[in-house]
Image (spheres, helix red, strand yellow):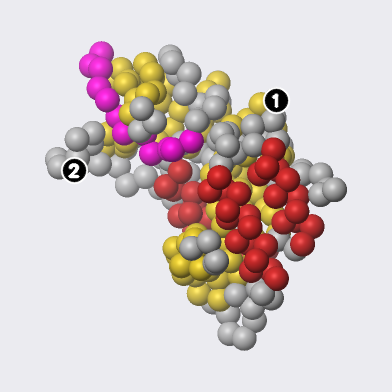
């Protein structure tokens, strides 16, 4: 995925109220940008870091600039826009990058399903074979080369794992796919230290047949594309 306009470089002053961030532009002007990320952004919101913004060019928006990237250390840029993760995965499937999800003719997005009234991010379908339900999770938190999810307690994420397990019981294929918008992780693990219930449910889901994948990107100010798989290390449900 290429950005359709050149990103604007700035320096982060602070992130606050979840959806707002104050930044200093290259000309010294201080502006407020929209932050398209509802998570804690653990490790990805340190003041003084270089950031990149996209101008929506929409005069009706109160905050026309949107925060897209942050450089957390030299050579490591992180895509913080969680709204892009579904698009990145869909594009990667269509481009043949995600080998495990190639045998499907159609991809539908945001399809209602499940007993808990969810919407599946991607529904893959092909003829008479079972539908494939793909739930996408954006991952931005990395410590010592290990990516963790979630970065805060995620009741919604727990619900999605239960929904995926239910689809397996109904005879469908269910996939949880971690979209890793940074290049410095060698594996993905559940963040048991933050949300132990999510970790428990993830291991239970894997034990009953939910497939868990992770694909990584190397974000740049020009664009972001998933390029390769990284292993998911979750242990065994006891």
Q: Label 1 belongs to which residue? A: 144
Asked if residue 39 is positioned above or below residue 91 in the image, the reply reads above
Q: Residues within 10 Å of mark 2 (few under 14, many from 20)?
A: few
Label 1: state its secondary structure.
loop
- Comes first in the chain, label 2 or label 1: 2
Query: What residue sits 36% from the left and 27% below the top?
Result: 17
Q: Residue 115: x and y, percent?
A: 55, 66
Q: How many marks?
A: 2
Q: Residues within 10 Å of mark 1 (few under 14, many from 20)?
A: few
Residues rendered magenta in the picture: 28-39
Q: Is residue 15 left or right of residue 93?
A: left
Q: Is residue 32 magenta?
A: yes
Label 2: state its secondary structure.
loop
Asked if residue 135 is positioned above or below residue 50 in the image, the reply reads below
Residue 57 location, quadrant? top left
Residue toward you, 122 or 155: 155
Query: What residue sits 43% from the left and 32% below the top?
Result: 69
Asked if residue 36 is positioned above or below residue 126 in the image, the reply reads above
Q: Is residue 94 left or right of residue 221?
A: right
> Is there any visible trace of residue 129 in the rendered image?
yes
Residue 100 location, quadrant? bottom right
> Is there any visible trace of residue 147 in the rendered image?
no
Furthest residue to the bottom?
A: 128
Q: Which mark is residue 164?
A: none
Q: Residue 31: x and y, percent?
A: 25, 22
Q: Label 2 belongs to which residue? A: 58
**Distance from the alpha carbon under mark 2 to that under mark 1:** 39 Å
Asked if residue 28 is positioned above or below residue 35 in the image, the reply reads above
Q: Residue 121: x and y, percent?
A: 50, 60
Q: Is residue 233 magenta?
A: no
């Amino acid at each position: 995925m290429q950005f359709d306009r050149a990103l604007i470089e700035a320096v982060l002053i602070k992130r606050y109220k979840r959806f707002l961030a104050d930044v200093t532009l290259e000309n010294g002007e201080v502006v407020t940008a929209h932050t398209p990320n509802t998570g804690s952004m653990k490790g990805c919101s340190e003041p003084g870091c270089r950031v990149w913004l996209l101008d929506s060019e929409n005069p009706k928006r109160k905050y026309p600039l949107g925060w897209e990237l942050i450089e957390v250390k030299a050579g490591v840029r992180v895509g913080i826009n969680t709204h892009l993760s579904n698009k990145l995965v869909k594009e990667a499937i269509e481009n043949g990058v995600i080998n495990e999800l190639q045998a499907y003719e159609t991809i539908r997005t945001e399809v209602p399903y499940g007993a808990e009234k969810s919407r599946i991010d991607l529904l893959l379908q092909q003829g008479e074979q079972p539908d494939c339900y793909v739930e996408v999770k954006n991952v931005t938190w990395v410590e010592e080369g290990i990516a963790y999810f979630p970065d805060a307690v995620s009741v919604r994420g727990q619900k999605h794992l239960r929904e995926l397990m239910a689809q397996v019981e109904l005879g469908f294929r269910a996939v949880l796919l971690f979209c890793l918008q940074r290049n410095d992780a060698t594996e993905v693990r559940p963040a048991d230290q933050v949300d132990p219930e999510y970790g428990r449910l993830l291991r239970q889901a894997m034990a009953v047949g939910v497939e868990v994948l992770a694909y990584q990107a190397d974000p740049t100010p020009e664009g972001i594309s998933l390029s390769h798989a990284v292993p998911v290390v979750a242990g065994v449900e006891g």
